[in-house]
Image: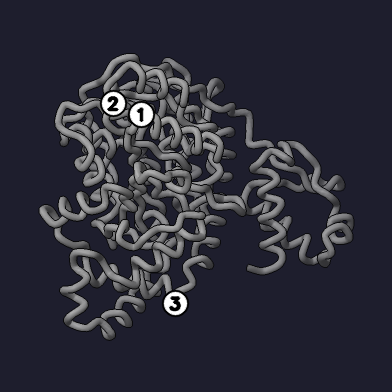
Amino acid sequence: MKRYEKFADEIAELIHTGVLAAGAKLPSVRHASRTYGVSPSTVFQAYYLLEDRGLIQARARSGYYVREQGPLPMPEPGPPSAQATEVGVSELVFSVLGSLKDPHTVPFGSAFPSPDLFPLPRLARSMAHALRHLSPHEVIADMTAGNADLRRQIALRYMVHGVMLPLEELVITNGALEALNLALQCVTQPGDLVAIESPTFYACLQVLERLQLKAVEIPVHPRTGIDLDQLAERLERMPIRACWFMSSLQNPLGASLDDDKKRALCQLLKRHQVPLIEDDVYAELYYGNQPPRPVKSFDDEGLVLHCSSFSKCLAPGYRVGWVAAGRYAERIAKLKLMTTLSPSVPAQAAIADYLQHGGYDRHLRRLRHALETQQGAMLASAARHFPAGTRVTQPTGGYFLWFEFPEQVDALVLFKLALAQGISLAPGPIFSASQGFGHCARLNHGHPWSAAHERAMDVLGRILHSF
């Protein structure tokens, strides 16, 4: 990392943690140069980089200030649901996913960032290199356990996060979704109750629907994450068999639990001996200097099944994920043998080679920078175009914003009207077992900002004003 990038990241961390509040003035170039022992050129480059990210702005003859993110406040947590809910959202989800098939549609409803942000040519070279050196024996031997080099590389990244993970605990899967499916199937039976977030990622609801499980919705605060008091009350009152939560950069809100709440969550589930399926696919997409710790890092009983993949941060379409399954690893490995047997051996070999030789952390820094810059562009555009009374999250990572519109807005009608104008979005009801959040929507800022995106925000604003 270059010196000015490191300096910019240090200032960004102060902004994300609230040490430098919105509207605060940054040190002058001369003062910052003397104080931090860097050249004026380094300070200028760092400030230009922070401007590109949408974090600061220059004022004529005054200096640099932390950018006000516009007049849109944060959403409020949704009301808790007191009952377990039968899940049936698949048809609604399929209609949203179908809206993304047209390449000319503005993909605010997509679940993925732009493929242009990923090093796909470099990955292709890694695949070619790995396959040339893959012995026929390894093709068969690695099918069930997973590529040995890949498992070692994943274990090394866990070690960076403070988790000393035995290789036997790692099960390589066909993307994170298979890992999550296997984890839930491993610890539940049809008819069981599963605690989930509200709102939650719609794939979670589809898995519950397929496995005939009932959802117990726990409200999530847009900034601080799941309501542990509500969860504790439900665990006392209901026979909950498992929890499925995103502890960091939750989809769709982008909320993250701090370390104290993660530790408290782990202790709460330990008391009740309820397993946690930790969906952590966005963990590498944080904006600050410090990666978020998973709940898995506080688990000393093997109750946390930590699931992730490379689909959101490196290799969309390669479908390589994993579960660090704790005490359930052997059972999950057997379930995988009875279903898909093995993920793609070439894809595993390619990613293992890339992690060893391709500059993964350098790619991640570029990706985070792009996503943070694009978030600033969408927030600024929403402040210009969307109606008074709109609220929006401001996550410290990822590529989603959650919008809460004035109550008269019907998100499903908004979805249809926007699609007619060539704009997709993800309406709030697909993120709830009870199909709540009827005046909310999730928008994806994971594609490089363009004039087409700005026009789409303008069109959405005019539709919203028409309600």
Q: CA distance from mark 2 to mark 3?
A: 44 Å
Secondary element type, mark 1: helix
Q: Quadrant of residue 243?
A: top left
Specify the amino acid type for callout 3: His
Looking at the image, residue 237 sits to the left or right of residue 294; the answer is left
User: Which residue in the structure is indicated by mark 1?
Assistant: 272
Q: Residue 38: x and y, percent?
A: 81, 65
User: Which residue in the structure is indicated by mark 3?
Assistant: 357
Question: Which numbered disc, 1 or 2, marks the residue that appears first in the sequence?
Answer: 2
Please name the residue shown 19% across and 32% down the image: 209
User: Is the residue marked by circle 2 packed among few (<14), some (14-19), or many (20+) residues within 10 Å?
Assistant: many
User: Which residue in the structure is indicated by mark 2?
Assistant: 240
Q: Residue 396: x and y, percent?
A: 56, 43
Between 36 and 316, which is closer to the camera in this rendering?
Answer: 36
2 shown above or below 435? below
429 shown above or below 249? above
Specify the amino acid type for callout 1: His
Between 211 and 417, which is closer to the camera in this rendering?
Answer: 211
